[in-house]
Image (cartoon, grey):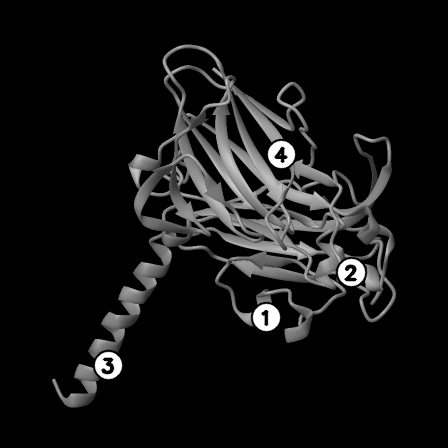
Amino acid sequence: MNTSSIIRSAVVSLLTLITMTVFSVANAATINLTKCVASMNKTMSDGASVNFWVFGSGGMSCSGGTLPAAAIEVGVGDTLNLTLSVMMAPMEPTPYNGHTIHLHGADVSTSEDGVPDTGASVMGDTYTWTPTAAMAGSYMYHCHVHTVKHLEMGMYGPIIIRPKDASGNFLNQITSNTATAFDYVQNYVFSTVDPAYHTATGDSTVFADYNPKYFLISGNEGKTTSAPAVTLAAAVNKKVALRLIGIHSVNSTFQIKDSSGAAKSFTVYVQDGRAWPTAQSMTSLDISPGQRFDVIFTTPSTSGTWYPQITYKKLRDNAAYATAYGKVTF
Ligand SMILES: [Cu+2]
């Protein structure tokens, strides 16, 4: 072989290897979703009506809008094409008109990032992401136009990156590590609501001070253990995974307590879409705005009720605002 044929042979081998690597992801799927924005009024626990802007599905007719938005599940190696239509969307006046989708925590190029300050269109776009195996875990999508207002308005929802088996089915594990296997799983989306932000627009001085009045888990207040925001019917001796997704705008502490108030331990496997080098067991976890944790706890051998709960705290002095409760029976 002369030099050029050796180089040509090496190039062909390299291209073959690259092709095999790219296309050897078993049963990688392409997920095409179109999101839109709808106005929604929600009656809060004190009887007040608060206006939200929520992501729904569809273009010209926007349906299924919820607070938070429906979770998007993407397999490792799948390609998500998430399209935003703003045709019928409620909007602020310029310069804060329009909306985007920001894939919070995702490793994407600037063109897929949905940040207007770095050139993203605010009048509709498609955002593409192909997460790798190392990215299994919990994320969120949210609007990045005048974020202080639009995030508060309810423009957010979870994105869950899940490992798949050789047939392309989702594994009931947080990551490819079998230690993260679970029997039950539930999303806990944390958010707070300052109603003054919902009526203010533009550069109003209202946005200079945040005074939340409602404290949510997955869109519900859950002010007491007898009126929890979310419930899960599990069984004894089972593994329950909770995906803790922080879209709140204050400090917070997450715990799981039994019916007598004793804190129960849970194990953190993944933080912000990356596996911890060593999983850690704990009874209390601080969650800052934007953070996500994927945790697992084991239900005991006798039936009962535990209450996963989050105490929201002021950014300035960490004083508690309120606690919101979930409920798991077994
Ligand atoms: Cu927006």
Q: Is mark 3 within 8 Å of ligand 1?
A: no
The label shown at residue 111 is 1
Residue type highlighted by circle 4: Thr
Residue type highlighted by circle 1: Ser
Gap between marks 4 and 1 measured at Cα: 39 Å
Circle 1 residues within 10 Å: few <14, some 14–19, many ≥20: some
In percent of width and height, residue 224 lies at: 66, 24
Could you say which is closer to the camera, residue 18 or residue 238?
238
Gap between marks 4 and 2 measured at Cα: 24 Å
- Residue farthest to the top? 302
In percent of width and height, residue 47 lies at: 86, 31
Residue position marked by numbered label 3 in the rendering? 8
Q: Earlier in the sequence, mark 3 or mark 1?
A: 3
Q: Is mark 2 within 8 Å of ligand 1?
A: no
Q: Are marks 3 and 1 in contact (CB under 8 Å)?
A: no
Q: Is residue 62 left or right of residue 285?
A: right
Gap between marks 3 and 4 measured at Cα: 66 Å
Q: Earlier in the sequence, mark 4 or mark 1?
A: 1
Q: Is residue 168 left or right of residue 221?
A: left
Residue type highlighted by circle 2: Phe
- Residue farthest to the bottom? 3
Residue type highlighted by circle 3: Arg
Q: Quadrant of residue 220?
A: top right
Q: Earlier in the sequence, mark 3 or mark 2?
A: 3
Residue position marked by numbered label 2 in the rendering? 207
Residue position marked by numbered label 4 in the rendering? 323
Circle 2 residues within 10 Å: few <14, some 14–19, many ≥20: some
Q: Is residue 96 left or right of residue 187?
A: right
- Residue farthest to the left? 1
Q: Is residue 188 visible?
A: yes
